[in-house]
Amino acid sequence: HDDGYGKEKCHEVPAMLCKDVPEEKCWDEPREECWDEPEEKCEEVPTEKCVDVPKEECHPEEKEECEDVLKEKCETVTKRKCKKVPAFDCQEVETEYEDYEIVEDCDTVQVPVCRPVPQEDCRDVEETTTSLIPKQKCYTKPRKVCSQVPKKKCDQVPKVDCKQVPREECKQVPRQE
């Protein structure tokens, strides 16, 4: 059947072909990082401070006390007594002799004896003590965060475009003169 068209005429034309492709998008987000760091803390604390102070303590103790006393000492001594006589006739006679000697007379008496004895002397004083207390330190550190976002990607692709071209038909037509 004749529709009046001839052949199809085709030629390439540029065309855009687009599709969604995932793309990674990244950005910095602030993030706080913290840690405990010990810190010294000084404070006055009431404390009892004791020292040993020597104190003299006395106790009665027995001691021998002596003194020199004159005492009469009597003893019989054999003594020679001589007389002048025409003829010397000597004989021994006993006579009493008195003499004094020093004798020690002793008694036991109680005498106080004192010795240093350590004694604790305590006072309340303010003393500085140091203790470690935890203290939190923080800083903001940027953190990279990424996510996939769709992106249109287009490419130029060749496309064939075809059109039906009308056919030219020639007929002989009588000429008019």
Image (cartoon, helix red, strand yellow):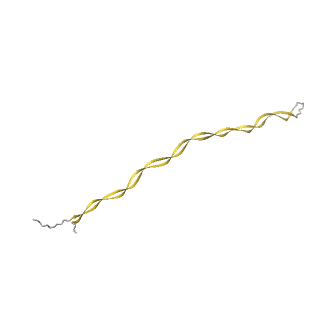
Residue 22 shown left or right of residue 74 in the figure: left
Q: Which of these two is toward me, 52 or 95? A: 52
Q: Position of residue 120 (x, y in %)?
A: 64, 40
State the image coordinates of residue 14 (x, y, percent, origin top left).
27, 59
Q: Which of these two is toward me, 133 or 106?
A: 133
Count the labels in the image.
Answer: 0
Residue 35 higher or lower than 65, as above or below = below
Depth order, front residue of 57/82 = 57
In the figure, residue 97 lies in which quadrant?
top right
- Is residue 154 depicted above or below 94 in this figure? below
Indicate whether 89 appears above or below 9: above
Query: From the image, which quarter does the C terminus lie in?
Result: bottom left
- Residue located farthest toward the left when viewing the structure as drawn: 177
90 vs 151, left or right, is: right
Residue 38 percent across, percent down from the top left: 51, 46
Image spot of residue 81 (x, y percent): 87, 32
Residue found at the far bottom of this picture? 1
Tell me where residue 148 sits by quadrant.
Answer: bottom left
Q: Is residue 137 rendered to the left or right of residue 4? A: right
Q: Nearer the viewer, residue 173 or 96?
A: 173
